[in-house]
Amino acid sequence: MPYLLVSTQIRLEAGPTMVGDEHSDPQLMSILGATKRSTLGNNFCEYYVNDVPRVVLDKLESLGYRVVSMTGVGQTLVWCLHRE
């Protein structure tokens, strides 16, 4: 899976950080220490880590991922990463 979205809400910039959806690579999620959660009202799961986004991005860089783009959507920060 070469693409990955990482996000956090601005008011939670100290964590937790969302690192994947229910179809993300389980091995990668394990390396990141992510746990799968379902939020009340959603019919899907997401993977979260308690690390701040900077720590998550550092870990992903060491695994060969590079930030392709970053944006703010409302109160959410989103990074798109790609691995060759």
Image: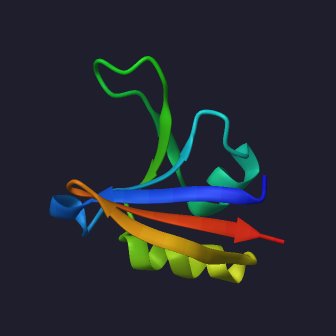
Q: Position of residue 39 (x, y in %)?
A: 33, 28
Which quadrant of the view contains residue 71? bottom left
Q: Is residue 18 above or below residue 38?
A: below
Q: Position of residue 76 (x, y in %)?
A: 28, 56
Residue at 70%, 68% (x, y): give it: 82
Residue at 66%, 78% (x, y): give it: 66
For the image, the number of numbered tags is: 0
Q: Is residue 42 above or below residue 80?
A: above
Q: Is residue 49 above or below residue 60?
A: above
On the rendered structure, is 17 left or right of 24? left
Residue at 53%, 51% (x, y): give it: 34
- Residue projecting furthest to the right: 84
Which quadrant of the view contains residue 73? bottom left
Q: Is residue 39 above or below residue 71?
A: above
Which quadrant of the view contains residue 74? bottom left
On the rendered structure, is 61 left or right of 55? right
Q: Position of residue 78 (x, y in %)?
A: 41, 61
Q: Which quadrant would the C terminus be assigned to in this image? A: bottom right
- Residue projecting furthest to the left: 11
Image coloring type: rainbow
On the rendered structure, is 63 left or right of 54? right
Residue toward you, 70 or 39: 70
Residue at 52%, 76% (x, y): give it: 57
